[in-house]
Image (cartoon, rainbow, N blue to C red):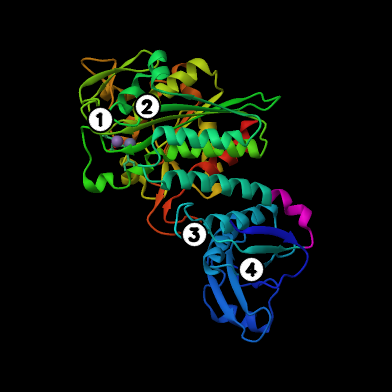
Amino acid sequence: MFAIRLSGDESPGTRVLPVDGSGVLAGGDEETAELVRTAEDAGRAGAVQVLPRPLRTPARLLLAGVGAADEGGWRAAGAAVARTASGDEPLDVLLPDRITPAAVRGLAEGLWLGGYRFREAPKPPRSATVTLRTEDATAYAESLETARVTAAATWLARDLTNTPSAVKNPAWFAGQVVAEAATRPGVQVTVRGPEQLAAEGFGGILAVGGGSATPPRLVELAWNPPGATRHVVLVGKGITFDTGGISIKSVDGMKLMRKDMAGAAAVIAATLAAADLNLGVRITALAPLAENAVSGAAFRPGDVITQWDGATTESTNSDAEGRLVLADALGYAVAELNPDVVIDLATLTGANSVALGKRTAALYSQDDGLAGDLAAAGEAAGEQMWRLPLPDDYVQYLDSEIADRHSSPTQGAGSVVAALFLREFLGDRTDRWAHLDMSAPSWAEKDDADLTKGATGWGVRTLLRWLALHGG
Ligand code: BES
Ligand code: MN
Ligand code: ZN
């Protein structure tokens, strides 16, 4: 990770000068002003111009476009600068007078997020020293710390999601959470293995995990600060690999299914970061972890599964496995944890991207306030979501002849009926629940602004914003 510091002193590194959307430059001279005048889009957020200055100090200038100079514009600039200044080149970023703390947060998040590399990658992460030059370091210290914790949590979620599934079986994933929790006082973690899951009736998790050589786990991670009045339960789908099971996927459909635990990674990373930021809200993260494998022990299409809450599900398609593990966790959360709000994140359906494309999650909630707050948190954080309906007249599609409901209707719309299935397990908390189908934005096909190719860590930033603003 870049070492980013605030200082009033000029550093010897490559000078970074911001240019806003109207072409106004902070700290430039005649030469740079001329460059901005001639380059058409110098001020576009994320545009970078490189100006070599042989035999002069500094030897390079970067003109970084910040667009509207809001948090998002600065985030885009930070990410672009992180990529342009590859290697160990120290950077000296000139902050304009009176830049807002939010903009500094955006800049720092952009630098760190754009500079991400997978922890097992052959190349180490970028590691230069970045000086953010300002006369008023104290005004921005908190922004920088919040950005650091947020980016580190996003890195953790990306690392977990990028890890190959031969490594990240459920026990390994649980072990990672235990190790992370151990470094944080005030955070507790409980891991249930297959025997305990059986004893307590987590039938969905056991069915989905039953075909794998690496048995399932349920991770329960708790942050319970003194004086907290609200309890938020975060649930994340944690399928460590999704073959589709006996309803097996195609080669194309399966190739990226190591990412099918991105929801679990996001809720775990956000909860750990909430502890790092000492947020005053009680949080329990539940991560049902299972590998949906093909074997003689795998559950079958047409099997009837008894979920944690006692309801039965006819599993008509073993590829609709995420909702089965989530159903157990949601039922347990509502009955045992007395939550004020339940939010689940899941790479639940391919239909998410059919409806909304590659960058936008589907948001479901019957609580207009919660839906609006989450969407606003996502907007501020740079993560998009769009609300879709929960139409009561589609509930009939869940009807089964042999069980309370069946898991994978062929009518309705894929992402919507999956959400309706989940809602069945919310008991008396249906109005205090939100579901994010984040199949699409959990992965990027290429580097794109603050996203790096591969796992995006989608949801960590949104959850942290929302928790900081509305959790307390
Ligand atoms: N993990 C997949 C959904 C998915 C697909 C996530 C593509 C990310 C990218 C999920 O378990 C799944 O297979 N869903 C099925 C549901 C269907 C069988 C009802 C789907 O979307 O096809
Ligand atoms: Mn599946
Ligand atoms: Zn899946």
Question: Which secondary structure class fits the magenta region best?
Answer: helix
Residue 431 is left or right of residue 104, and the answer is: left
Q: Amino acid at mark 2?
A: Val
For disc 1, the marked residue is 318
Q: Which mark is residue 103?
A: none
Dot 4 or dot 3: first in sequence order is 4
Q: Residue 254, how many percent across, how many down?
A: 27, 44
Element type where label 2 sits in the image: helix
The answer to whether marks 2 and 1 mark residues whose Cβ atoms lie closer than 8 Å is no
Query: Along the polypeptide, which appears first: circle 2 or circle 1?
Result: 1
Q: Is residue 244 visible?
A: yes
Residue designated by label 4: 90
Q: Is residue 432 above or below residue 403?
A: below
Q: Of discs 4 and 2, which sits in the foreground? A: 4
Distance (Cα) linking label 1 and label 3: 36 Å
Q: Which residues are magenta?
A: 135-143
* Residue drawn where x is 22% and y is 31% of the image: 295
The residues tagged by marks 4 and 2 sit, at their Cα atoms, a distance apart of 47 Å
The x and y percentages for residue 58 are 67, 78
Name the residue tied to disc 2.
325
Q: Nearer the viewer, residue 2 or 381?
A: 2
Circle 3 sits on which residue? 449
Which amino acid is tagged 3? Ala
Give the quadrant of the N terminus.
Answer: bottom right
Disc 1 element: loop
